[in-house]
Amino acid sequence: MAYLELRNVTKRFTKTLAVSDLSLSVEKGEFVSLLGPSGCGKSTTLRMIAGLESPDAGRIIIDGTDITDVPPNKRGSGMVFQAYALFPNLTVRGNIAFGLEIAGKSKATTEETVSRMLQLVQLEGIESRYPSQLSGGQQQRVALARALAPEPHILLLDEPLSALDAMVRVDLRAEIRQIQSELGITTVYVTHDQEEALSISDRVAVMRHGTIEQIGTPEQIYRNPSSRFLAAFIGTANQFSGQAVDNRTVKGTHYTFDTVVPAELVGKSVVVLVRPENIRVFSKTEQIPDGSNLISGEVQMITFMGSVTRLTLNVYGERVVCDVTASTHHFEHNQRVHLAISPDLCQIMAE
């Protein structure tokens, strides 16, 4: 049995269906992210787990106990919000100790726990400061320590890094993952940032219109999206339209793909999905490997991205994006090139 279970959970706000018949299982110690665009229901789902919202239907189970109707302060969960939600009149130490004092912990236990939390989130030496004297990253560390101090059964994080600068965000998400792994605490993390979700999660649940569109490991979600929405939402995917004429061939107006076509799509209009890193780009004079699908295009934009250079090409009036290794290739604007795509790196979906 999973440690956290949501069984057919539904939530409405007046006439808006925020979450629709959603089911989710999270194992003990697992880090699962709820990822999706604004308004997809991910924060509402998290708030129902926390007890801040009540489902209109369905049940929520933690460690075999139905907590659907249990008050938030009795659920044994710790929550970190986007806006920190620190008490401005309390010091760092006071904020972290707050939940322990409310729970009636002894002074000695509280002091020991606060000291341990300060070390865990690397805030030793500033425990006497007030929130207004801290940076955004430091405030979020305090919020994380406060949530972890009572030793909750489950940790819930609602877009905790979205208000931070890019560099701080990258550093802090790595720290959150390290702390979670060290403590082994079951964690549900809400974000709209795909890179964030893919980089720190054991599994990612991509949500759309109040339901889970697909759930899997970051690699599964990226390499095998179950829909065109997912392919476009997670990373970048080039989409080539055509007709699946048989189980090995997709014919477009200007190109033909040799690849494996699922039996149920033969004879139908389909889309061939190809990630930018799976397209090899060659100049007209270079030797092209045998067995590849070939398409011609013209370089329109060159974007240096560090380890790779992103080429934006015009392919028969359509925009195609390719990533090439910056140190081994040199291309110019308006250059005519060949695109080589291996048959096994194509994914076929219904139009």
Image: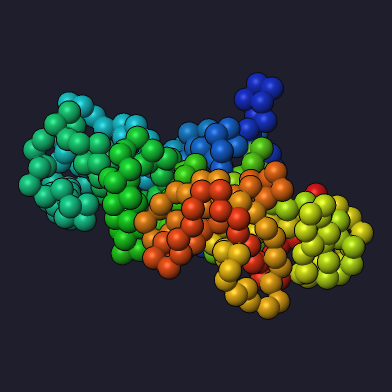
Residue at the spot x=78%, y=69% of the render? Answer: 258
Is any atom of residue 146 visible in this view?
no
In the rendered image, residue 105, in percent from the top left (x then y), is placed at 22, 46
Q: Nearer the viewer, residue 16 or 191?
A: 191
Q: Nearer the viewer, residue 82 or 26?
A: 82
Considering the image in quadrants, where does the N terminus appear? Answer: bottom right
Residue at the spot x=65%, y=21% of the render? Answer: 14
Taking 268 as reference, is 321 left or right? left
Q: Residue furthest right?
A: 267
Q: Quadrant of residue 12?
A: top right
Q: Nearer the viewer, residue 61 or 34?
A: 34
Tell how many labels. 0
Relative to 57, residue 180 above or below: below
In the rendered image, residue 98, in percent from the top left (x then y), is placed at 23, 38
Is any atom of residue 258 visible in this view?
yes
In the rendered image, residue 274, in percent from the top left (x then y), is placed at 65, 59
Residue at the spot x=11%, y=42% of the render? Answer: 127
Q: Residue furthest top?
A: 14
In the rendered image, residue 128, in percent from the top left (x then y), is placed at 8, 38
How was this image coloured? rainbow
Q: Nearer the viewer, residue 52 or 335?
A: 335
Residue at the spot x=66%, y=26% of the render? Answer: 16
Relative to 34, residue 245 above or below: below
Q: Residue furthest front?
A: 285
